[in-house]
Image (tube, helix red, strand yellow):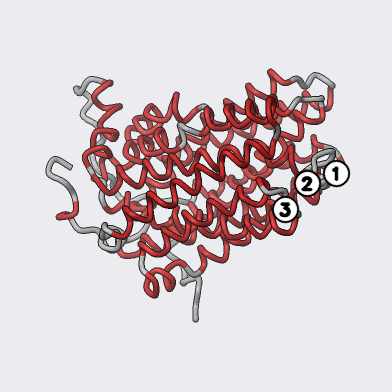
Amino acid sequence: MRLLPTSLGRSFNGLWFGTGASNLADGMALFVLPLLALAIGASPGEVAAVTTALTLAWPLFGLHAGWIVDRVERRALLTGVSLARAAVLAGLTAAHLTGALSIPLILLAAVLLGVAETLVDTALTSTIPRVVAPEARNRANARVEATINVTNQLAGPPLAGLLAATTLALATGAGAVLYVLAVAGILAMTLSPGPAGPDVTEPRRGALVAGLRHLWRQPVVRTLTLYTAVMNVVWAAATALLVVYAVAPGPLGLSTAQYGLLLTAMAVGGLLASMVVEPLRRRFGVTTLLIADAAGTVLLVLPVAVGASAWAVAAGAVVAGAGASVWRILVATIRQNLSPPELLGRVYAASRVISWGVLPPGAAVAGLIAEVWGVRTAFAVATVLALAVMAAFLRYALRTDLSAAAGTPHRDLLLPGG
């Protein structure tokens, strides 16, 4: 059985290569920024603050990112943002080598990288429909998701860990080079004619919230966005504090390279799931797969909450990674199918503002709980929340037909005015 289909075209391949190179750099940066903070003596709360800073852009800038993406030429935007991210990592490299690194500087870099992510992610998902046919969207989304898992999570953390074992500056410098390489793929794209941009006579505020209005009027997209948001509170706690629990002198006592391999377990689950999501969808249906992801979110935090071994933590990460990958692929296709092309960038950005907007406060609250009551208590609270979300989503999913929305686009699935 062929799991990865043949080429989806030259333009998609260019987007695919650029996505791979930039996400490999993203994975390295996400891994190395908390380590940079630890290297200069940061507390658990300060390490969590770095994660908070990385995600702060979505609630503050996300709607603007969607408005920008729907108005500007995509290749120019992706090229400029990639070069800007390279400059940020190059600056961190220089600061580390000269001894000028500080927590405020790391936080500033994290904020800038977060703003760049809002633009790149919004442009990516809204460009896929312009380089592949509608019936190929699930394939394209699955291939992109597999690439993100390989580069961002599977290859990025261990590669950064290996380079960081020599010097942290080597890891940040390599990330800067990868962002530059991503530009080659972006420039290879040829986009099909897109829809007309927003009416330039429309007040800017109206243009900014148009995607949010459509999202809120579309019941399936709205509900999935809200469930994603609550589950992301759990992921925020895990992302912010797992490094503190896992890396020595934390309870698991892992080295930076071993921690990279632990994160790789999560990526392995996501990679395998993204490779077989289409046959899984045909065999089990969209509803079953999304329910399985809700269960996987519980397993992301439960092993740490009960003080399990590194092997159990890794096993939970595999299941959680697989579920998250399937969720992203199917929900991305549903959102693309149920959104007007001229609003897609803003609908995606609006969904991220809601679903990722919880990450900064989620990480901050997790850091506060860890400071006062300990890391395992923070994971215990996250486990209770994950169980509550799983129960609520099970009830919703069993009485909602999600399969139709994840198939080929149908105009009658759009609400009036959409």
Left-right relation of 63 to 159: left
User: Which residue is pictured at 65% across the width and 23% down the height?
Assistant: 107
- The residue lying furthest to the left in this view is 416
- The residue lying furthest to the right in this view is 166
N-terminal label among 3 and 2 = 2
Which residue matches tag 2? 161
User: Which residue is pictured at 53% across the width and 51% down the height?
Assistant: 297
Q: Of residues 381 and 147, which is closer to you in this image?
A: 381
Which residue matches tag 1? 165
User: Which residue is pictured at 59% across the width and 61% down the height?
Assistant: 269
* Other-residue count near label 1 (Cα within 10 Å), few / some / many at <14 / 14–19 / ≥20: some
Q: Secondary structure at mark 1?
A: helix
Left-right relation of 417 to 342: left
Q: Of residues 244 and 275, which is closer to you in this image?
A: 244
Q: Secondary structure at mark 2?
A: helix
Dot 1 and dot 2 residues touching (CB under 8 Å) = yes
Q: Between label 1 and label 3, give the one nearer the viewer.
A: 3
Which residue matches tag 3? 308
N-terminal label among 1 and 3 = 1
- How far separated are the C-alphas under marks 3 and 2? 23 Å
